[in-house]
Each structure stands twice: as C-alpha cells, then as structure tokens.
Amino acid sequence: MPVVHIYMFEGRTDDQKSAMAQGVTKAISEAAGIPDSATTIVIHDTKRSDWAQGGVMASDS
C-alpha cells in the first residue's frame, strides 16, 4: 500500500489537485502492478511563509 505525500505551495484548485492525484496514482499502479485503490495520496498545501530553502524563506524570494 503506497502512501505518497506531496508538499507544495498552496494555491492550486481542487480540480488541479484531483488531476495530480489521479496521475500519480495511475503511474504508481502501472509501475507496481497494483490496483488504484491501493495507493493513498496526501497533499500538503504549505504557505510560502512556512517553507525555507537554504535558509531563505520562500515568501522572501
């Protein structure tokens, strides 16, 4: 049972997130030879002010 966590900045629509979840699920199902229902997707919408890379806040770049 794969569990996929996707971390990204907030702002995508529900339709965009749904399309992404469907695409990731299909890719895993085909590669692993498992049914779509075996894959769980968790999308973490993150504010830019809660994300830093290289010590720089995403909200500052």
Image (cartoon, rainbow, N blue to C red):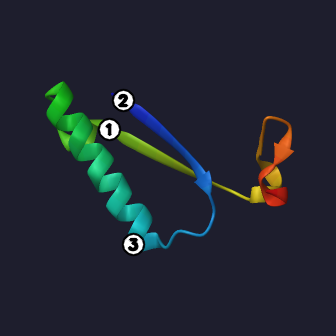
Badge 3: few (under 14), some or many (20 or more) residues near its Cα, within 10 Å?
few
Q: Which mark is residue 23?
A: none
Q: Which residue in the protein does label 2 denote? A: 2
Q: Amino acid at mark 1?
A: Thr
Asked if 10 appears above or below 35 in the picture, the reply is below
The N terminus: image quadrant: top left
Identity, as a three-letter code, of the amino acid under mark 3: Asp
Mark 1 lies on residue: 39
Q: Position of residue 17 (x, y in %)?
A: 43, 62
Residue 11 to residue 51: above or below: below
| Quarter of the image where the C terminus is located | bottom right
Q: Is residue 26 left or right of residue 8?
A: left
Q: Which residue is mark 3?
A: 15
Q: CA distance from mark 1 to mark 2?
A: 5 Å
Where residue 31 sits, quadrant-wise, is top left
- Looking at marks 3 and 2 on the same chain, the residue that comes earlier in the sequence is marked by 2
Question: Counting residues from the N terminus, which is met first, the one under dot 1 or under dot 2?
Answer: 2
Is residue 18 rendered to the left or right of residue 26? right
Q: Are marks 1 and 2 in contact (CB under 8 Å)?
A: yes
